[in-house]
Image (cartoon, rainbow, N blue to C red):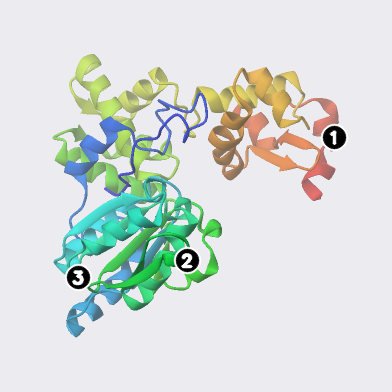
Amino acid sequence: MNWDETPPATADDAPSGAGGRLVGADADGDDQAVEAALRPKDLGEFVGQERVREQLDLVLKAARQRGGTADHVLLSGAPGLGKTTLSMIIAAEMGAPIRITSGPAIQHAGDLAAILSSLTEGEVLFLDEIHRMSRPAEEMLYMAMEDFRVDVIVGKGPGATAIPLELPPFTLVGATTRAGLLPPPLRDRFGFTGHMEFYAPAELERVIHRSAGLLDVTIESEGASEIAGRSRGTPRIANRLLRRVRDYAQVKADGVITREIAASALAVYDVDERGLDRLDRAVLSALLKLFGGGPVGLSTLAVAVGEERETVEEVAEPFLVREGLLARTPRGRIGTPAAWAHMGLTPPPQTAAGGQAGLFET
């Protein structure tokens, strides 16, 4: 099973109304506690991400043969796909300790200097959400990655002096959900860059079967397939749904997860066959029923749903767009033909006759 162990989101990090979603990709406290016990320990156990695994395996084996530290690694991709897990595997494969921190926690260059100066030779430093690090710390990191040295400024004004501090060779593993926000000088200093893709249903089934074994849960192949199809291509969500279905099977049935049990359990938790939850369906329902499929402005749509604008834009829309159920156009949000079909609604005549077709062609 592969997913990230990210620090719990604060009120400032998550849009209002985003917390507590069963199909949310961010980890909460309960997720982190369970994930620690279920993470794969080496690349052989890691499911999915075949290209990244193959490339990373070559990088680590070459470093071990040279007897040196591995190149700095940048992992990008959506939350819950395995970036933190891979960082821990890198440390394990290199036989090195790992230190975990995050970009938002490093607000000053001194914070980063304190961490870097305490690293031991060969240690792996995992820096999650690296794109959110402060600019002064980011500039200090350039020299640390390239020359294994930092200049510590002592004093202020004309009397300030820079004291060079040598660092032992280390491996930085940076993780980001928004690689485009990384400045080129920082991105270029990583020796290996891997992009984490969403998982195919067959890969998620393997993740679910492995997790079920570790959790001592009996699950049939069709039950795993049902859960995988509603997991949004994300292992973290797949394992969260597995735990909820396990609870349902334990209370309502004989503890065995079949397709029928999985479908009934996820219906209780408002997760439909495509992985949409209450918020997703509310957005689609308002868009289709109230506004005839659009186009409609984001603020108007958010008011109709009863959520904040940021919640609709950052929490609901990305998955709906990826699934081809909603489209963003210069004139506003519109529902696609797939959205009408999924919601079991008949589009109005002007939509069926091509009244919105021009919006898809631009």
The residue labelled by disc 2 is: 158
Q: Mark 2 falls on what kind of element?
A: helix
The residue labelled by disc 3 is: 122
Q: Residue at x 39, y 35 (%)?
A: 9
| Residue 124, horizontal then vertical, whole percent | 24, 63
| Residue 39, horizontal then vertical, whole percent | 21, 48
Residue 63: image quadrant is: bottom left
| Alpha carbon distance from label 2 to label 3 | 37 Å
| Alpha carbon distance from label 1 to label 3 | 64 Å
Q: Amino acid at mark 1?
A: Ala
- Can residue 287 be seen here? The reply is no
Q: Are marks 1 and 3 in contact (CB under 8 Å)?
A: no
**Which mark's residue is nearer the viewer, 1 or 2?**
2
Which residue is situated farthest in the bottom direction here? 66
Q: State whether residue 212 is above or below residue 57.
A: above
| Alpha carbon distance from label 1 to label 2 | 73 Å
In primary-sequence order, the first of circles 2 and 3 is 3
